[in-house]
Image (cartoon, helix red, strand yellow):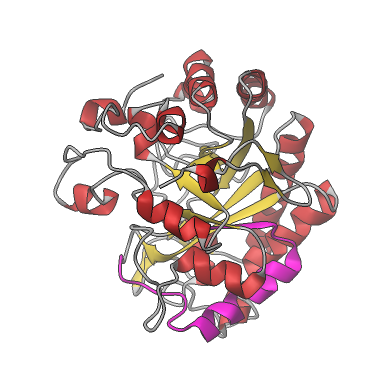
């Protein structure tokens, strides 16, 4: 099967890419002092040299006092960190790629003692919960919400200022924005809770704030998921109708591209249709959508983790992906672990050369460059 669908140019109203291959965001914890360094520059530059159209960074902390949840993850605020990201952006551009930082707040995942301006702060979340019924942290006040929205907006302004081609809001996987989306962790009694539209309000305020600050033409990507790291079978929406109720306020607020995170891209999202989450989202919104989930590999990331480590995996062909793209189900495909294992994945995929691709293992998953 031709690989043409994946390697056609992508053109939208405000983002043009040489192909539809996107590097998925992957946290690696290789930024001592929370600042990107020359190894980070080389890592992203190498994937751009390997033919990726758009690189989305690992999760980067916005400038809120409780945003961080892990050691050695990069931040997206402060003069030194932004100077480091500017080097990344310039290197990716020089190699022919485009770059978007993923803006991130971990929410209730944070534990006291984590790196940050105030290490002993607990996790901040809608109801103090990290998962349904488990209160471990601070239930956010309206003032906390406004401060956090402002931190996301400032990060987007800074991203535009240093030459990033777009930004992505991390609204998936049980982190802060998703903790508002998810009824299990959002048990508030105000306008941010209750209906699925109300639970989207925090995300909508972030999108609207960014849109107002960066103007009408700067691309905003939103990553969301049904599953949560706290609860893999969790659902935001059980039907296409519920999904439409969730998406409409975010669509209206100014999201340009929806990044629809699933564990296995080939699985249908709802009974009675073969469409996956990206397919349904594109059908509902009419906006370009990005699929992700074990592309080019034969093993599920979550299955590997639950087995207690990273089992070795084999590279596989992408016929299923190309078939869905030929049908117009979604516009973009985000590739994760396969691009860590083989920075030339895009070149090899365009040549349909899967036999020579490197399999992934624990070593390749922590490779620096």
Residue 272 found in image quarter:
bottom left
For image coordinates 48% across by 51% down, the residue present is: 106
For image coordinates 22% across by 38% down, the residue present is: 314
Residue lying at the far left in this picture: please name it: 307
Q: List x then y, in percent, for residue 151.
A: 68, 47
The answer to whether residue 251 is magenta is yes
Residue 235 found in image quarter:
bottom left
Residue placed most toward the observer, 322 or 290: 322
The relative height of residue 219 versus residue 266 in the rendered view (above or below) is above
Residue placed most toward the observer, 271 or 115: 271
Q: List x then y, in percent, for residue 249.
A: 68, 74
Direction from residue 124 to residue 282 in the image, left or right: right
Position of the C terminus by quadrant: top left
Q: Is residue 126 visible?
A: no
For image coordinates 51% across by 28% down, the residue present is: 34
The relative height of residue 58 versus residue 366 in the rendered view (above or below) is below
Residue lying at the far top in this picture: please name it: 38
The answer to whether residue 47 is magenta is no
Q: List x then y, in percent, for residue 94.
A: 66, 18
Q: List x then y, in percent, for residue 244.
A: 59, 79
For image coordinates 26% across by 51% down, the residue present is: 300
- Specify start and end residues of the magenta stretch as a single range: 232-260
């Amino acid at each position: 099967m031709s690989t043409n669908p994946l390697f056609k140019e992508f053109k939208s109203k405000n983002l043009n890419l040489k192909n539809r291959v996107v590097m998925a965001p992957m946290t690696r914890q290789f930024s001592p002092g929370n600042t990107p360094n020359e190894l980070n520059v080389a890592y992203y530059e190498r994937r751009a040299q390997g033919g990726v159209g758009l690189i989305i960074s690992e999760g980067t902390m916005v400038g809120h006092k409780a945003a961080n949840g892990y050691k050695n993850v990069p931040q997206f605020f402060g003069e030194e960190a932004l100077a480091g990201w500017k080097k990344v952006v310039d290197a990716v551009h020089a190699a022919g790629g485009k770059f978007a930082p993923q803006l991130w707040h971990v929410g209730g995942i944070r534990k006291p003692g984590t790196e940050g301006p105030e290490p002993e702060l607990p996790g901040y979340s809608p109801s103090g919960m990290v998962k349904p019924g488990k209160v471990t942290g601070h239930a956010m006040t309206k003032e906390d919400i406004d401060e956090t929205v402002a931190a996301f907006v400032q990060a987007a302004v800074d991203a535009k200022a240093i030459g990033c081609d777009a930004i992505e809001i991390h609204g998936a996987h049980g982190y802060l924005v998703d903790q508002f989306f998810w009824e299990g962790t959002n048990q508030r009694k105000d306008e941010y809770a209750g209906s699925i539209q109300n639970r989207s309000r925090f995300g909508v305020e972030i999108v609207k704030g960014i849109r107002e600050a960066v103007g009408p033409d700067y691309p905003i990507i939103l990553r969301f998921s049904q599953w949560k790291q706290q609860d893999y079978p969790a659902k935001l929406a059980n039907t296409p109708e519920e999904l439409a109720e969730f998406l409409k306020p975010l669509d209206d607020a100014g999201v340009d591209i929806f990044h629809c995170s699933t564990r296995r891209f080939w699985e249908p999202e709802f009974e009675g249709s073969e469409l996956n989450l990206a397919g349904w989202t594109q059908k509902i919104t009419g906006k370009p959508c990005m699929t992700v989930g074990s592309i080019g590999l034969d093993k599920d990331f979550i299955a590997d983790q639950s087995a207690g480590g990273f089992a070795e995996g084999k590279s596989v062909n992408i016929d299923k992906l190309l078939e869905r793209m030929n049908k117009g189900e979604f516009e973009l495909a985000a590739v994760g672990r396969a691009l860590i294992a083989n920075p030339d994945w895009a070149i090899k995929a365009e040549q349909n050369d899967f036999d020579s691709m490197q399999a992934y293992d624990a070593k390749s998953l922590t490779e620096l460059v």
